[in-house]
Image (spheres, grey):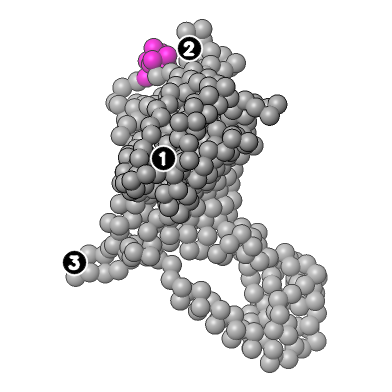
Amino acid sequence: MLITELLGEATEYDKKQAVETKKPKSWLKSVSAFANGSGGMLVFGVADNDDIIGLADIKSASEFVSQKIKERIDPLPEIFMELHKVEGDKDILTVKVMEGEETPYYYKGDGSMEAFIRIGNETVTASAAELKRLVLRGRNSSYDSLTSTYNFKDYSFSKLRERFYEWNSRSMEEKNFESFGIVDGNGKLTNAGALLADNCPIRHSRLFCTRWNGLDKSGGRIDALDSAEFTGSLIILLNEGFSFVKRNMKTAWKKTANSRIELPDYCERSIFESIVNALIHRDYLINGSEVHIDIFDDRLVVYSPGGMPDGTKIQERNIDSVPSTRRNPVLADIFSRLGYMERQGSGLNKIRNAYRNAENYTPDKEPVFYSDRVEFAVTLKNLNFLASESEAKNEAKSEAKNEAENYRLTELEEKLCELLLAYPELTQPEIRERLNLSRSKVQRMMKKLAEAGIVIRKGSKRKGYWEIRLDGGVK
């Protein structure tokens, strides 16, 4: 019998060469994690490399495992134990742990009480936020369905009403607020309601957007070319985030026989789906962490707090077969009623397929999905970015460096460079005033120094600065 036959349909499992009796926590924590997750299986008598070792006394081993699970796992999960005879005379014990309905399932022992979860193929102690999530699951509840301390009458929902009318061609009635799960019977907002209020009172529901200068976050004298922080209703965050990306992306084009085809840096459908996914499926139990949109020269990254709800890693999954699991079902349902997402939960496929259908798509531009214990990130590649662009920039810098090294400054030009080194944010009128020169004289000097690669303007006219390159270096 092969190890795959022992596992059956189990996707989460741990192999143990023997039943550890002196330190049973080494395998009991997996029982806790499987019950707190989507279930799993322990296989005793098999080495990590899948060699069948077998158990010397399977009857005693199975009794010990059963006893320790009853003694040390609380509440007691549903398990199924089976004895297997393989390779003729080797005994194997499998313990199938079912997905629990009374989470969290704790390990009790060694003077402590801990809950465990699975992250990828590892068993780890549940954090405070993860423990809260397990408690909510055990109550058949979710963060967004919980009643808050905020009164419905104190908040406005103009953005929600506008979008509802736009999508449904009718006004949103007062009774809809309760049926949608926005307000409870006592006039208190649910957390979903608080997140959708125009002046959302939940502080960590914010969106940070940055257009970085270069391929990483250390772009030089100016790190960011554009940045913004947005607060308010999730609808505001969605619209503002989408607008921020659109104003920071370019559209190339190419001519055909009868028309012109536009080639945007990023697929708008993919951007929109990525932001919706981040806002709706993020873990709001993680305080002090917000959704981020980071735009670099070659890519756009949408980051949201919280990994996959089932603890798996998205980069290890087949996107086509990932089931729809909603961490915030109330918000997801409302967004589907507003036409922002589908109930089937096909967002990741839409992100990928929109890219594959783009005119300027190549396989190396495939969107990348990543998750771990604390984050979920979608990376969209700039469809118009080429490595040669980077090389061209480096060549231009090298040429400018050579020109600057061979250029001999006049006495007046030296004074100008010294002034800009000390005060790089000066405007040309301020330069004229400090050096007591005419407008035309300053313009001629600046043009000459710019052509020599010595004076370089960075940023806009109003908020930029001067960069001085002397002796081949940046000052």
**Which circle marks residue 258 in the picture?**
3
Q: Name the kind of residue labelled 2 in the image.
A: Asp
Q: Name the kind of residue labelled 1 in the image.
A: Ile
**Which circle marks residue 184 in the picture?**
2
Indicate which disc, 1 or 2, sits on the residue closer to the N terminus.
1
Which dot, 3 or 2, sits closer to the camera? 2
What residue is at 64 percent from the left and 84 percent from the top? Answer: 401
Tell me which corner region of the image, top left, top right, bottom left or bottom right, holds residue 94: top left
Residues in magenta? 172-179
User: Which residue occupies the foreground of this view, 75 or 444?
Assistant: 75
Question: Main SS type for the magenta part?
Answer: helix
- Point out the residue furthest to the left here: 258
Vertical placement of 338 versus 409: above or below?
A: above
Mark 1 = which residue?
A: 92
x and y, in percent, of residue 76 in the image? 50, 21
Q: Name the kind of residue labelled 3 in the image.
A: Asn
